[in-house]
Image: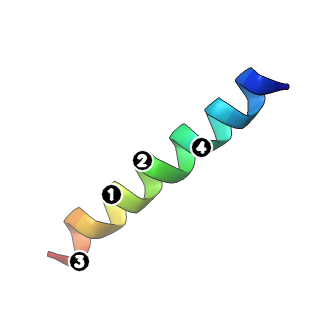
Amino acid sequence: MTSAIFTIGAIILIAVLLAWLVSE
């Protein structure tokens, strides 16, 4: 369960970073 939460968090973090880079 912990690894699943970590994986989801990592995916969200990457998605936010990509969206931020694109918006620049």
Marks 1 and 4, the one that precedes in the sequence:
4
Tell me the SS state at disc 2. Answer: helix
In space, the residues marked 3 and 4 are separated at their CA atoms by: 21 Å
The disc placed on residue 14 is 2
Q: Residue at x 76, y 29 (%)?
A: 4
- Point out the frontmost of discs 2 and 4: 4
Q: Mark 1 points at which residue?
A: 18
Q: Horizontal and vertical percent for residue 8?
A: 66, 41
Q: Which residue is drawn at 85% across and 25% down?
A: 1
Q: Do the residues labelled 3 and 4 touch (CB within 8 Å)?
A: no
Q: Quadrant of the C terminus?
A: bottom left
Tell me the SS state at disc 1. Answer: helix
Answer above or below: position of 18 versus 8: below
Left or right of residue 20, residue 13 in this image: right
Three-letter amino acid code at disc 3? Ser
In space, the residues marked 2 and 1 are separated at their CA atoms by: 6 Å
